[in-house]
Image (spheres, coloured by chain):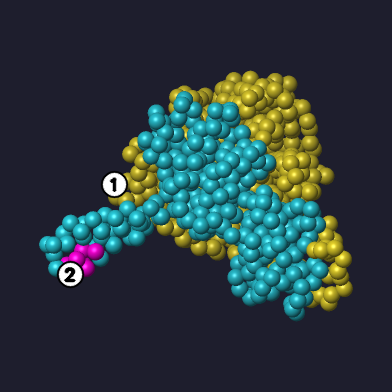
Chain colours: A cyan, B yellow
Amino acid sequence: MRPDVKILTQSFLYIINVRITGLARLFFALFLYLVSIQGLSQDTNDPPLLKADDLPGAKFTSSRSFSGTSLFGYMNGGAELYLEYGLSDATINEIEYRGRKYKTEIYRMNGPEEAYGIFSVSKYRCLGMPQVGDYSCCTKYQLQFCKGDFYINIINTGGTRADSLASSEIGKIIAERIKGKEVELSGYLPDVERDKISSGAFLAKGRLGIVNGSPDLEDHFKGIRNFTAVVLKSEKNLLSVKFNDQASFMSFLELNGINPDLSSDSAVVRKISDMHLLIGFTR
Amino acid sequence: MGKSLNRRRFFTLLGAGGASLAARPLLAMGTAENQEQAKPATNISDAAKTARKPGSMPGRFPGKVVIARDPNSVIDDVPVESVAYAMIAKSMLELTGAARTEDAWRLFVSPGEKIGLKVNPVAGRLLSTSHAVVQSVVRQLTESGIDRKDILIWDRRDMELKDTGFTAENYPGITIRGTECQDSGGSFTDENGKLYGERNIDKEWYYWADVEGEYDAETMPYMINGGKYSYFTKIVTREVDKIINIPVLKNAGASITNAMKNLAFGSVTNTGRLHASLWNETCAEVCAFSPLRDKVVLNISDGLRGCFNGGPGASPQFICNYNTILVSSDPVAMDRIAYDIVAAKRIEEGIQREPTPGVLSFLSMASSLGLGIADKERIDLRIV
């Protein structure tokens, strides 16, 4: 139960203690508990939208929402990538703030991995990684970050320092409203420091993710499905790929000429667990 | 590059020392090709039932592509109309060999014909077909004797056209229409609950593919119908006599979205089902049906600003100034050249290591359908 609701419940119970019977108290407590759960669930499920009083003087000029495949209504061809990762819904707002125009795209993905995945494949040549969300990347016209199940993209049209500062301000407000746990990637890349992972790893959950994030690996995933791949390109290039089913795992082995009897680590292909490989490669 | 070499590069030593994979017994090699799933059937054979016309795709100048470049065509990330106008005019002269721009245009269009300009606003204001290019095309058309009332700017979505500035205010006297549309209250449906978009499709013309489109109520307004049929918009089947295709130069993964994709996916309904398994086939085959094959006379690719990754959507970090316009009557040849431009930029930016023209299977399909020339060696490329 949330602390504020717990205090409220206790206060009510204290006040009416002398007036109601034990059974009635039980029902009343149950009622308040259910109300609190409902409230908590709304906090978790509602998109972390900006409110009118968050940005004094801001004008919200447009708001659109899309769920699942209706994202085709926002980005015709581009929607496929989001759907491949696993999109729940998206809310697109346009804002005029301090005389400048901003667009916020709030994508709720099916989990933190999915949110990190779409973030990782979208970021490029970050000019900075401001402390917004779990992972972030800012460029002249864009601040993007992921936190919990959400991938957030804040686009400005001016490309100025003032735009970057305002984007950061907007981003922090949105980030504060997001609850949820951070993506855990260390299981994919054991023995690699978090900093290295966060600065360079990208995560794919299908062919489009591979094509967009690491097109040089496309041939190695042709026709392969039901996998999560984490790719880290640094002094040692690593591909960690985990399959959801045995058939997909076997197809990958066959496509890439890997011995299915791989029972222990080799110098090239290391078996992390069933249907999960760590592979070294050159670019 | 051969598959075996790819594999050698793929599997290298994970750590220092250790045995290489080459020492291990390998399974019989599966190839990428045999991993590909069988493609769903389509009704492409129906396309040939309508006889071609003298000007049918690839039009008057098969295999000829003109590239115009000007570093001053984009200033502060905004395309410059006067420069775009000059680039298009020069390209038209080079393409046709005409002495005057008006004469060049009149090889493709005539007064009294309804001319549709197929733009691409799908990525929104960040990366739509630029007004610099579209206004230049409109000016050159009117200077060539085409009445403004005979020009129609169109795309799939009325709302995206408006959002990106294709409005009566900016284009007075010109009709602007999208197949998918809303009323002034924002509703996609009329008083009977029927999608407005349904009124705009022509069920006599369709692309059938053995892939079911299944959409929820929220998605349907953007697809108009589900099932296995993708109907052509009446804009192409009934409303225009000629089409000038004005795409934006963009990547689509390691491939491109330019002339063919702009036409194909912009002209039919129920496209959501086609992206995943029939992207290449759709780009080629939809263009083989008469409403596009026999009406598209010219392609002007807006590469003043484009993107090299993240396409076909617009991600600011991947948008770049190509400062380029391509002109051709042959959309296949144009896309082949456009691919080289995008691939070079992707290599320069470190997105990929080398060209992968294998991604252009839609062009070889289009070529085999007689829609244009995909073989680069046979393309007559002119740079002005």
| Left or right: residue B222 compared with residue B33 | left
**Residue B292 to residue B277: above or below:** above
Which residue is painted at 76% across and 52% down in the image? Answer: A234
Image coordinates for residue A85, horizontal then vertical, percent: 56, 57
Same chain? Circles 1 and 2: no
The amino acid beneath tag 1 is Glu
Per the model, the C-alpha gap separating discs 1 and 2 is 56 Å
Quadrant of the rendered structure where residue B133 is?
top right
**Furthest residue toward left:** A19
Q: Identify the residue under disc 1.
A: B191
For image coordinates 74% across by 72% down, the residue present is A254
Looking at the image, residue B37 lies above or below residue B203: below
Please state the chain letter of the residue tagged with numbered disc 2 in the rendered image.
A
Q: Residue A233: x percent and y percent?
A: 74, 53
Residue drawn at 79 percent across, 36 percent down: B381
Q: Which residues are magenta?
A: A22-29
Q: Secondary structure at mark 2?
A: helix
Q: Is residue B50 visible?
A: no
